[in-house]
Amino acid sequence: MAELTSDNVIISTTEDGADLFANLYYQGFDGMILYQQNITHTFFDLKSKMAGELLQKASNFRMRIIIIGDFENVESKSLQDFIRESNRGSLVNFVSSLREIL
């Protein structure tokens, strides 16, 4: 697992995410830990379809993604449902802290 940290947004577009998945995959990683603040807000707006596109690309690379953030007070019902369904699987998980992963 690669833990990616930055003071900036790392994934602004679907292409950014796909490039990141490919780079990590070819370096031998099969998973990544990202922080909510490093992903564009568009990802969390399910109407944009960015989340679905990125998760499909992650699936193609068999790349596990863990996103750390504050998801307790998400107002969007569809995003709440998406997070809940994702957390039932093993490809993408939304957690509140690194400690929760370990």
Image (cartoon, grey):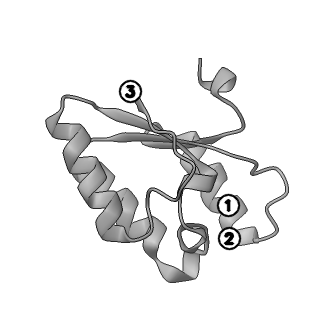
Residue sitting at 33 percent across and 63 percent down? 16
Identity, as a three-letter code, of the amino acid under mark 1: Asp
Q: Is residue 12 visible?
A: yes
Residue occupied by mark 2: 78
- Nearer the observer: mark 3 or 1; the answer is 3
Pick whichever of labels 3 and 1 is earlier in the sequence. Answer: 3
Numbered tag placed on residue 15 in the rendering: none
Identity, as a three-letter code, of the amino acid under mark 2: Ser
Residue sitting at 47 percent across and 66 percent down? 51
Query: Is the Cβ of the residue at disc 1 closer than 8 Å to that at disc 2?
Result: yes
Q: What secondary structure is found at the residue carrying circle 3?
A: loop
Residue occupied by mark 3: 1
Q: What secondary structure is found at the residue carrying circle 1?
A: helix
Q: Is residue 65 left or right of residue 74?
A: left
How packed is label 3: few (under 14 Cα within 10 Å), some, or many (20 or more)?
some
Measured from the top left, where is residue 84 in percent x and y? 66, 50
How far apart marks 1 and 2 lie (CA) works out to 5 Å
Give the position of the C terminus as an image quadrant. top right
Identity, as a three-letter code, of the amino acid under mark 3: Met
Measured from the top left, where is residue 39 in percent x and y? 53, 59
Give the position of the N terminus as an image quadrant. top left
Pick whichever of labels 2 and 3 is earlier in the sequence. Answer: 3
How packed is label 2: few (under 14 Cα within 10 Å), some, or many (20 or more)?
few
Residue occupied by mark 1: 81
